[in-house]
């Protein structure tokens, strides 16, 4: 189990770098007074949503898929909104309770962080 998580680490880092780029680019678009946590959640959500969509498209055919640990990592890193939206819009990973549980835990954590 841990080997899968370690194997997914490089792809998770690539997606987090992309989220960082979206975060940086969103600054001028949303204004300098926008909350950086909100901007990060937006950036990570966009990348996570795209990953769910890409993985769903790949699940129907042949090709390399995004590891489940990468999807988990993106959700925990702040992509909760994109994870929920991707799960229900693409109907992807809806039959796996661990995805719902992890998204729920991540959502509570990020909601607490925003509130605090």
Image (tube, rainbow, N blue to C red):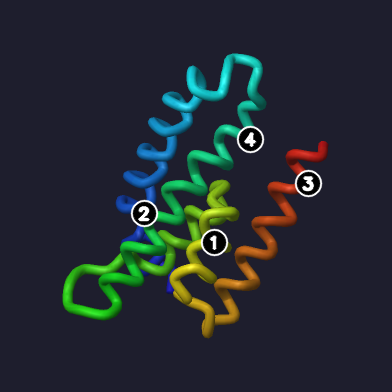
Circle number at residue 112? 3
Circle number at residue 85? 1
Residue 50 spot, x, y in % from top left: 38, 55
Q: Earlier in the sequence, mark 4 or mark 1?
A: 4
Q: Earlier in the sequence, mark 2 or mark 3?
A: 2
Residue 3 spot, x, y in % from top left: 37, 68
Residue drawn at point x = 26 percent, y = 71 percent: 58
**In the figure, is residue 71 to the left or right of 56?**
right
Residue 108, by quadrant, is: bottom right
Residue 90 spot, x, y in % from top left: 44, 70
Residue drawn at point x = 61 percent, y = 66 percent: 102
Q: Residue furthest top?
A: 32
- Quickly name the residue at label 2: 9
- Quickly name the residue at label 4: 38
Q: Nearer the viewer, mark 2 or mark 3?
A: 3
Q: Nearer the viewer, mark 4 or mark 3?
A: 4
Q: Nearer the viewer, mark 1 or mark 2?
A: 1
Q: Residues within 10 Å of mark 2 (few under 14, many from 20)?
A: some
């Amino acid at each position: 189990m841990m080997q899968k998580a370690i194997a997914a680490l490089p792809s998770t880092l690539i997606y987090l770098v992309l989220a960082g780029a979206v975060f940086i680019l969103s600054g001028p678009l949303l204004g300098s007074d926008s909350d950086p946590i909100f901007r990060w959640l937006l950036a990570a959500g966009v990348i996570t949503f795209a990953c769910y969509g890409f993985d769903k498209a790949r699940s129907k055919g042949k090709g390399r898929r995004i590891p489940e640990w990468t999807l988990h990592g993106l959700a925990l890193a702040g992509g909760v909104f994109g994870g929920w939206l991707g799960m229900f819009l693409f109907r992807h990973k809806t039959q796996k309770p661990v995805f719902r549980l992890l998204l729920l835990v991540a959502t509570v954590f990020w909601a607490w962080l925003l509130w605090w």
